Image: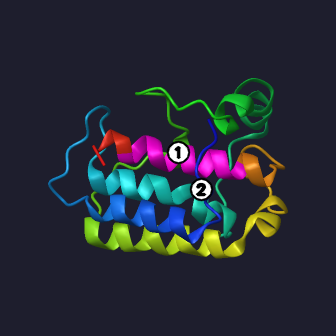
Amino acid sequence: MAYPSIYLSSTTEELFRRIDQLNAQSQGLWGKMTVGQMLSHCAVPYEQILGLNTLQPPLLMRIILNLFLKKSMVNEVPYKQNSPTAPSFIRTEQYDVAIEKERLKDLIKTIQEMGAKKLARTPSLSLGKLTATEWNNLLYKHLDHHLQQFGV
């Protein structure tokens, strides 16, 4: 089943509705992250696309990701609970939930406005060249996974 299109404002609005249900007391149904850490974690791929975060895995890890994990990261199969997290995505500090919610929403809106064609011309720091559909699946699936983690 295809994921909703991150390129449509209706999808962005639905994601915002879910994000807005989160608060500092929101508890994860699995995993170790606090809600603030999760929101900061979810911002990483958007920051990478926009050049605000340029941390990328070492070359050997990028090769492994492309050979063995890329397909599962960009397909239409949801992520499993408690999947391992890339080191550059791990968040251990405490974050202000209200600030992180607004920051993530701003990033999501920026990518939506960027559009499919421009996003498809932007390589992933971990996976290299992705199609507009692969970007859609990767970004939507990741965010949806973590919103479900926190029950929204």
The outermost residue toward the left is 25
Residues rendered magenta in the picture: 135-147
Residue identifier under label 1: 142
The kind of residue on which mark 2 rests is Pro
Residue 57 in the image: state x and y as whole percent: 68, 43
Q: Is residue 62 left or right of residue 52?
A: right
Residue at x 79%, y 39% (from the top left corner): 59
Q: Is residue 90 left or right of residue 17?
A: right
Under circle 1, the secondary element is helix
- Viewer-closest of 11 and 142: 11
Q: Quadrant of residue 15?
A: bottom left
Q: Main SS of the magenta segment?
A: helix
Residue identifier under label 2: 45
Residue at x 64%, y 61% (from the top left corner): 48
Give the distance between the C-alpha atoms of the residues marked 2 and 1, in whole angstroms: 9 Å
Q: Quadrant of residue 47?
A: bottom right
Residue 129 in the image: state x and y as whole percent: 84, 50
Check residue 142 for magenta coloring. Answer: yes
The kind of residue on which mark 1 rests is His
Labelled pair 2, 1 in contact (Cβ < 8 Å): yes
Pointer 1 local density, CA inside 10 Å: few below 14, some 14–19, many at least 20: some
Choose the circle earlier in sequence order: 2 or 1. Answer: 2
- Viewer-closest of 61 and 6: 6
Residue 39 in the image: state x and y as whole percent: 38, 57
Query: Which label was assigned to residue 113?
Result: none
Residue at x 37%, y 50% (from the top left corner): 38
- Viewer-closest of 117 and 73: 117
